[in-house]
Image (cartoon, rainbow, N blue to C red):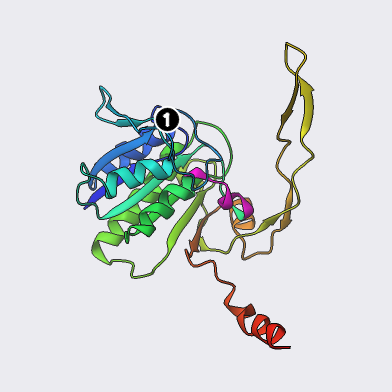
Amino acid sequence: MKILLSNDDGVHAPGIAALYDALSAVASVKVIAPDRNCSGASNSLTLHNPLRLQRLDNGFYSLNGTPTDCVHLGTNSPIAEDVDIVVSGINDGPNMGDDVLYSGTVAAAMEGRFMGLPAIAVSMGARGHDHYETAARVVAELIQQMQQQPLRLDTILNINVPYCPYQQLKGTRVTRLGRRHRADVMVRDRDPFGREIFWYGPVGNHQDEHPDTDFQAIRDGFVSITPLSLDMTAQRHQQGLQDWLDE
């Protein structure tokens, strides 16, 4: 199996190194990742500047673009090679609930799905650099299972892993996205030159943490696997909209 590995924390992030080490033991892995932290980049593309690819001493490729650019270059460009699956991560912190709308980690996996490939996004359930090996082992085991029994679902697997040693994991749950309360108000400040600036405030607390959500799975110590669809059509509202228009 050939894996294209990317992330949004940047090519030098410890999470992608841990995931590369684990996946290299079970598959052939090529890394193309942003040259800087692109957290919050979502599905953005670099359209007004040229993209430059640099091979690093460890064999990873660094790109002056977004996570989506990295996967697009690795799957749909003159230098693209055959790829069986796209994996993105390991993100430093969770990508659950509403976070997936902004996540560059999820966006990289989504671009792989756009290209017709199976895709996995993986994130830690809390911030910190102590337990990347836990998430890396979870994904490596999942990849091995996929090699033996391919997953024939037109989805992205969004995986969040509790921040703990592997032996303390309670198991795995298939979940749905929870929801957060609205984020705190933006912070208003001044730069050293007295000019007005704004910073995003902290994300909102959990609003929907029903037992079947990703939030609750992580809180209970379970790996959360949420299948995500690219089709954003609200199909259950189509007829209602048509009836409203007809009236």
Tell which of 194 and 58 is nearer to you: 194
Q: What stretch of residues is rendered in magenta?
A: 98-104
The quarter of the picture where the C terminus appears is bottom right
Q: Residue 29 in the image: state x and y as whole percent.
A: 25, 42
Residue for point 79% across, 39% down: 185
Left or right of 106 in this view: 98: right
Q: Amino acid at mark 1?
A: Pro
Tell which of 34 and 129 is nearer to you: 34
Decide whether residue 15 is among the magenta residues: no
Q: Main secondary structure of the magenta part?
A: helix
| 198 to 174, vertically: above or below | above
Q: Quadrant of residue 115?
A: bottom left
Label 1 CA crowd tier, 10 Å (few <14, some 14–19, many 20+): some
Left or right of 139 in this view: 160: right
Tell which of 167 and 55 is nearer to you: 55
Residue for point 28% across, 56% down: 144
Q: Residue 177 in the image: state x and y as whole percent.
A: 60, 60
Q: Is residue 220 visible?
A: no
Q: Residue 154 in the image: state x and y as whole percent.
A: 39, 68
Q: Residue furthest top?
A: 193
Q: Quadrant of residue 15?
A: top left
Decide whether residue 102 is among the magenta residues: yes
Residue occupied by mark 1? 14
Q: Is residue 187 visible?
A: yes
Left or right of 213 in this view: 41: left
Residue for point 64% across, 57% down: 216
| 233 to 30, vertically: above or below | below
Q: Residue 109 in the image: state x and y as whole percent.
A: 41, 51
| 121 to 153, vertically: above or below | above
